[in-house]
Amino acid sequence: MTVGAGTFSGTPVRRVEDPDLLRGAGTFVDNLKIDGMLSLSFVRSPIAHATIRSVDVTAAREMPGVVGVYSAADLELPDAPALMALHPAAIRPSLAKGTVNFVGDPVVAVVAETRAAAMDAAELVEIDYEPLGVVVDMEEALDRGSPAQFESLGGNVVIGLRTGSEDPLAGADVVVRGRFENQRVAVVPMEGSAIVVDPTGTDFDLTVHLSCQMPHVARAGLAKLLGMDQERVRVIAPHVGGAFGAKHLSAEGVVASKLALELGRPVKWVETRSENLVAMAHGRGQVQYVELGLRRDGTFVGMRCRMVGDAGGYGGFGGILVLGQTKLMAQGVYHIPAIAFDVAIVTTNTTPMGAYRGAGRPEAAAFVERIVDMAADELGIDPVELRRKNFIRPDEFPLTTVMGADYDSGDYGAALDEVLRLADYDALRREQDERRRRGDRMQLGIGVSTYVEVTGGGAEFSEVEVHDDGTITVKAGTSAHGQGHATAFSQIAADQFGVPIEQIRYVQSDTALVARGRGTGGSRSVQLGGTAVLQTSKLVVERAKELVAELLETAPEDVVVTGDGRLGVAGVPSKALSWGEVARVAAERGAPLLVQHDTERAGSTYPFGAHVAVVEVDMETGRVVPLRHVAVDDCGVIVNPMLVDGQVHGGLASGISQALWEQFLYDDDGNPITSTLAEYAMPSAAELPSFVTAHTETPSPLNDLGAKGIGESATVGSTPAVQNAVVDALSHLGVRHIDMPCTPERVWRAITAAQAGTLPDPWREPRPEMAGFPREGAAGEELERGAESVNL
Amino acid sequence: MVLVTVEVNGSSYQHEVEPRMLLVQYLRETLGLTGTNIGCDTSSCGACTVLLNGESVKSCTLLAVQADGAAIVTIEGLSGPDGALHPVQEAFHQHHALQCGYCTPGMVMAAVSLLAEEGELDERGVREGLEGNLCRCTGYHNIVRAVLACAGDRAPVGEVGAAGAAAS
């Protein structure tokens, strides 16, 4: 279960990736220059829903430097790629055909010798639109009369399904009810989407430099869409400026590829930030109706969930997450004996939905942890005690939940104990009491969350080779874009070979150099890619030991890795060969020290943790300031604690920001009103506090490292902790819920309503359409499996 | 077209540029100094921050022609003549203050400028001083630590090596 006898794993090795990035030598796609390369720009719809009556590209085509101007009618374009299809009817063309379905929908592609020429010409394209009815609100989209995007669906409901228990609240003494909005947010990697497609190379028909998370997945998708042999396509993910679930082959990437093939010249497309905020898939976007039944003593009896998931324009694949990971994780860290989970997934005239850091799991933890806090308020039980009372206990693992999740291992109480100790919870409560007694303008809010999420699953590839100069090349099919795999995976390998980390050369993210892989997403990389590197390294070491045994005339079991870069005979320090010498002999004998290996498919792992958020609420203005955030996250056995904490820090910022600030907004006509970074409320260093991070380490039994994912956990845990803290600051006034983001206006309105005795009921019945969906059948089960099989 | 004369990373350049060309485009496209990244189109993110006559500026807020006669340092010119990392770069490395690395050049240049401008810096000062630079990976935690570590070790920070590392 441990990594081995080496000295790197478990230590904060500084990143081997850093020097190039610090010197400005990054290889981000836009830095690439190829002779004869053309620039691509898009004309996008300024209208949320319309029929395209005509497209006039005459003036644009006449501009100097313009090579071609194309609408869907001018090119035989394949449909846009989708990681998962929501419904056979919900198809998105790569360029809009006949209608546009959201502001930002690409309609015309302009190719020119320079980016400036392409953008100038795009300004001259004239498109005549006939506006159609618009639906922006996902609950209004439930109405069969709402303006539909796909006639064959007869409305905007792509999937409507009732699942689980028929009567989950039976036997409850108390039922606590809440309607929660989990708002739409933008992903905002600092580098937007970018692609260079080169058809001029000799070794491949198409070489694609794509800012993405899963180059092999992108290659397979692109080859299929273009009808090419994927062995003739090379996809390289160079330095990637963040992805967070949203960077895959896009509709625009398919257009760029098609045009490069048509024109026989390299084509570059790099989206602007204003394009990125409407073109890159958005995340979250659910309305959650949740009812929790309890006995008077606080024991959970059952829960009824009725959920609406926004798929956005064309039915973006992110819409499925409510029926996938959100449903799977609806039980959280608790015993909830019966759960009903009804789902409506709808299209709206907004940016298509996709995955964003957590992809369905933050949405689950958000409603579970919110309803538990509401129940604690209702019953007058401390939220910490109510959680403890209903925890799944450490001796119950492995365990299959009523939602069908196979929890591998966990100790939820240990993480909670640790976070309360680090936060000094009792002292915080005392300070809160004092501030309330004094009637301070700045009130304290203390929010707790305990969460579990799901990561990884599947298999992964690795290749390890020892060269005759003693260096070792390590490859994995995962594809880092900031996570630090080159460092972490080198640590794992260096320990097995007993060599300094500098002797390892790590290779990833290029389909021509790495035979296969599933890329990075769903917090899968260390537990699967890292395990693949570990297993493959061990296979190489085994083979080397056999050879050394023969050369030094001893038994293979007596050969040891010496730790100074050699293989020797145990107890006989003088008898040893260097890795370079062994590799040379192996190569001479025609069996080089090279092993390719795929791990066996492993089940998903379930990281967990507990967070305490402390906020200050200005009772006169409603402004919320996050003062402290203490996070205890358990990702199993840790390879590099520095990298793990880095992942936690980023996850915390995203989670805190969703709770307090970020929201992608549209007006009633579907016009985005947060489509630049001047309007979208992404936080800077000035808004965020420093974080306190710690870890319990409960190994996963499902992989050789004992590791679980960590890339998204802190986002899952932090959002409800912060939201709970804001409500907690006002709970003495009778406030029971404030939707995210907890903006000053919303908080101020809650305070004002509480003082006037006009607080709104946090509950209302969902729309009647929800009751009319069919109960889960074979179709529904198939959809769920589809959602779980893709790592986002 | 307008003639522009600038000094970048210690070397002098003269180019005819379109009047509408942004400084960041001049650096990236004309000089080939692609270390300076573009992260937005509203001067909000700071990814393109460089030093102009010693002070940080978002190079997308300036036209190339406005930089006429100025001395500019980009991330490529920050390390010493021997290639050693500048103390701020080294602190970012030691404190794991970068992940994907896209905001990093701008963030480092903003930090160099902040450290040179402020006599004393506490955490609040660092956070507010870097308010114009966005990062999606780090939650800023380790960036703040890295800059505070430099603030506690003032001596080498004011120096900005001009290695003349222009690529063209």
Image (cartoon, coloured by chain):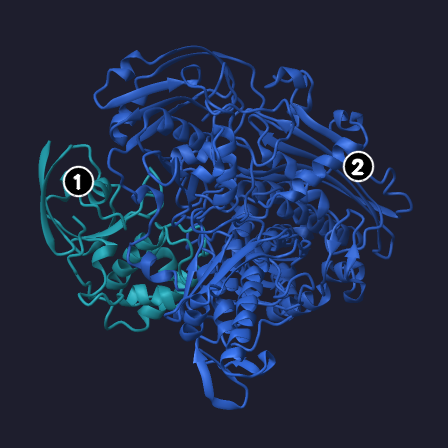
Mark 2 is on which residue type? Thr
Q: Quadrant of residue A534?
A: bottom right
The residue identified by callout 1 is: B64
Q: Chain of mark 2?
A: A
Give the residue pinned by disc 2. Answer: A163
Indicate the position of residue B56 as horizontal and vertical percent values.
24, 53
**Would residue A560 appear left or right of A609 to someone viewing this image?**
left
Report whether A559 appears left or right of A190: right
Q: Colour of chain B?
A: cyan
Quadrant in the picture for residue A262: top left
Residue in view at x 30 percent, y 44 percent: A31
Along the viewing direction, whichever of A587 and A362 lies nearer the viewer? A587
Residue lying at 44% horizontally and 21% vertically, measured from the top left: A45
Circle 1 — which element?
Answer: helix
Where residue A689 appears, as percent x and y from the top left, is: 48, 59
The kind of residue on which mark 1 rests is Ala
Residue A148 point in image, percent of width and height:
61, 18
Q: Residue A713 vs residue B27: left or right?
A: right
Q: What's the residue at 28%, 16% (across, down)?
A: A61
Q: CA distance from mark 1 to mark 2?
A: 61 Å
Rendered hue of chain A is blue
